Structures are given as structure tokens and as C-alpha cells.
Amino acid sequence: MRRKMRSLLVAGALGALATSVARAEEIRELRTFYFGNSLMENTMVGLHGQLGASAGKKWDLRGALIHPGVPIWVHAVRQDEPDSANHKKFYAEGPNTDAIVMLLFAGSGLSFTTSEMWGKEKFDPPRDVGDVASCARIIEHYLKLNPKGKAYVYAPWGFSLKGVREVKDRIKKEAEAAVRAKDTAREEILGKIKERKPSDEEMDPIRRTGDYAAAYLTKDYIPEVPTAEMKERYRKYTAAIGKPGVPAKGKTAAPATGAPTTFAALAEAAGVSVDQVRSDLAAIRITEADLSVPDAGQRIGQFIHAHPNTHSRAHHWAVMEGLKAKFPDLWKEGRLGIIPVGDVFLAVDEKIKAGKVPGLVNVCEFTTDGTHIRSGLPRYTVAATFYAVLFKEHPGKLDWKIYGDRNNYENKENLEKGKLNLIGGHYVHIPDLGTHLEITPERAQAVNDAVWEIVRQHPYTQVNK
């Protein structure tokens, strides 16, 4: 498996060499602008300038649009609204930048054309809110501001840890119980519980048994997002799964014998043909035999509520192929690339398991809550990957102690005054930091080497030294 992964990277890199532009000259200064959510904040953007200076570079963050939970399509929509604060901020700083970075996270697949999102975003005519179209739209805006600018996709990690959802659900129930048991305002208790992350005691067993490679290299990735009509049929399918059977008109329902659900039963429940059921479920790789699996309904439900497995290599690379097709000249000129954090985490995971990162069991220990990452080594790993791609250099010159000092993550003066925890002018959410994961010289070297190994040979970074 691991050899195959490396072969894929190397093979892709050889193909990229034919079209990418080698950069022999040193990049000493870079002005950047970021689009993202809390996973962009997890890179500690406020420390990028200081980190770059430690290697003799001027890493000038001209601006960042970082909003909790916001996927890239929202940023694209806001850039199409001249009166929005986001549009005005980017248009003010965009001409003064050399590169933009766009985070892929919690998006709507590669392509999804719809007339509404989230019940409040309405589009007339319908809009493609998929990751390819959304990144492309931001790039189009950027090239108007700086025709010579570079555009990068930030492809983050992809944890999928069994047990995290149960812990979070229990925390939520505890909050609700506290509201009922205490004479305290609901808003106050829910506000406190919102800041409550799973503890190390709750998370450590989950982290240590996690399988990052299985999640990030998932074979269940499906690029298409179901239409609204398909989602409605899926809802009817999930309601019928596990039931004793749906009677045909004029007949009595079969007793609850525990027999597996059939395509015919789902067709009857949804009022469609068996062929329609077969086609719908084939689109998400579910066979009739799969319907007897306990979590069959949950698997189908994933496509009703969200697009699954976009936090994977398959999705990240597919987005890059889509952008290459839309911007062939940008790609050929070496001005379109990826910051492959997800792939770097995979390489770090291999080094950990090979005993080259002392004290760790696997890379799943990087996460705070199954989504965000801890202060220290995890956040340094991400920042080092940004540096290696943007400056096209091995990150060995960086002073990792900047990320190794927990004090650099908390603005004590602001916190004492009850203000936001601003680092370098950018907010850092303290609960996401979790328990600090120490950086040692041995760990820093292992991470730096893993970063450079991936960045140099990756098919989409356009770093060839």
C-alpha cells in the first residue's frame, strides 16, 4: 500500500515535470492573501511573517478572509458581491499580493449546480457551488487584480476517527442536561459547552487507534453531489431500510422477520421503479447486498446532509485537475499549485510508525477534536508545508521554536482585558489548540524532511529542485 502511494506520487511528479516551470532563483519576498475557515486559522497565519523572517524571508500577509465553518463557495459568492466587506477587502489588497491561497474544506464536491444553499443563499440563475467552480471564480477575480499572480489550493488533513461523534454527542447531551438541572440561562450554558472540546482522556484512545491512511486514501470518494430530487428519494430510501417490508397496494404488510431490505421494498416506499433505485444507489456505490449492513441507512444519509469524503487525496487531486483544465496557461507558467498538507500528514504518519518521530504513535495524535489540530508540532507541520510550497525551499531554515512556544499562541494582554485572542492581527481560537504537542529537534527534522519529500515530488506543487 505504502509503496503504491509513493509510486503514484513519483509517477505524477514525472508528468508534472514536463509542464511545470522550474524556479532556480531564490524567492526572498512574498505577499499573500488567504481564503478559508478555522482550518486556515490552524496554520497560525499571524505567525507566518515571523516564521519567514527566521529563514531570512519577507513573508507578508496582506490580508485574510477567515470565517468559522465557511467553505470556499461562500468566499466565491462574496467576491461576486461588490458591496460585501469581503469583496472590498480583497479588491483593496489583491493588487498588492503575489499569491492567493484557497482552503478546500466542507465543500460541495467537484461540481454542484443549485438555486439555493443553506436555506438562505438564493441563486438566480442557479450557480455551481462545487469546489472547482468556486476556486476558479476566485482566481478569475484575482487575475483581474494581478494578472501575474499565483493561485494555490490548500488541501488540508483528512481525519475520520471512530468514536469522536459519540463523544461530541455526549457533550451536547450534558449541556442540555445542565440547562434542565440548573437555574441558568440556556444561552450561558450552551455558550460554555460550545467552547468545550473533547478532553485528552476522551480523545487519546481514539487518536491512538486511528487510521489516517484509511481515511485520507478512502476508496469511497464520489465526485458528484446528488441533486435535490435525488436527495428526496434518498430520504425515502433511508426511512424504509430495516423495516419489515412495504406492502404493495391492496396487500398486507409482511411481518417483521428481520429479512434484509430489498430494492423492491425501497422502490415501493419511494414510489419509483426498481431500476431507479438501482441507479440511485449505484451512483453512491451501494448494492442490494449492502442494504443488510447495519449502517446502510447512515451511508445513504451522508449524501442527504453533506458530501462525504471530500477531505481526501482523491478530491484534492481531482480539484487540481479541474483547475488545470480551466487555467491551462496558469498551470504551464507554474502559477497554479497545491499546498498538500493532507499528503504531508500521510508522510509524517509513516515516519512516526517507523520510529522517526519519538514519542508518538501515529499522526492522528495531531488532532484536538477530530477536525482541528493541536498547537506545537501539528501547526508547525502545516506552516512548514506552506513555506516549502510558497518559497520553493526545504523548511530546514525555519525556527520551529516559534511554533514550539505555547506563549506565542495566546495574547495574554488581550485575554486579561477580555478581548479577542489576536496573534499578528488574526484571531486564534484557544479551545482548538488543545494540549500542546512538543516540538523537539528530532521531531522538527522528521517533519521538515517529510514536508520536502512530498513537496518536491508532488504532481501539483510545481516545486522541482
Image (cartoon, helix red, strand yellow):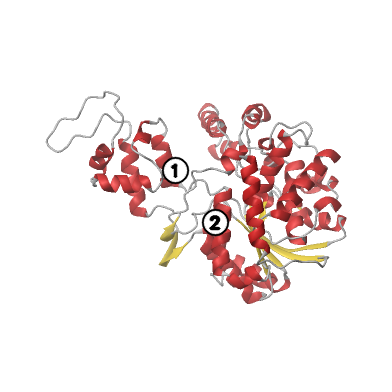
> Is any part of residue 20 visible from this angle?
yes
The residue tagged 1 is 302
The residue drawn where x is 60% and y is 44% is 158
Q: Residues within 10 Å of mark 2 (few under 14, many from 20)?
A: some
Looking at marks 2 and 1 on the same chain, the residue that comes earlier in the sequence is marked by: 1
Q: Position of residue 85 (x, y in %)?
A: 61, 66
Q: Quadrant of the N terminus?
A: top right
Q: Within the image, what quadrant is residue 389 found in?
A: bottom right
Label 2 – label 1 distance at C-alpha: 20 Å
| Residue at 30% from the left image edge and 45% from the top image edge | 277
Disc 2 or disc 1, which is closer to the eye?
2
Answer whether labels 2 and 1 touch (C-beta < 8 Å).
no
At label 1, the amino acid type is: Gln
Front residue of 358 and 72: 358
Q: Quadrant of the C terminus?
A: bottom right
Residue at horizontal 40 percent and vertical 41 percent from the top:
300
Tell me: 436 left or right of 319.
Answer: right
On residue 318, which mark appears?
2
User: Is 180 situated above or below 283?
Assistant: above
| Residue 238 position in % (x across, y down) | 35, 39
Kindly state the secondary structure of the residue where label 1 is placed.
helix
Amino acid carrying label 2: it is Ala
**Relative to 20, residue 458 above or below:** above
Can residue 70 be seen in the rendering of this structure?
no
- Looking at the picture, how far across and down is residue 284, in whole percent? 41, 46
The residue closer to the viewer here, 84 or 386, is 386
Between 371 and 155, the one nearer to me in the picture: 155
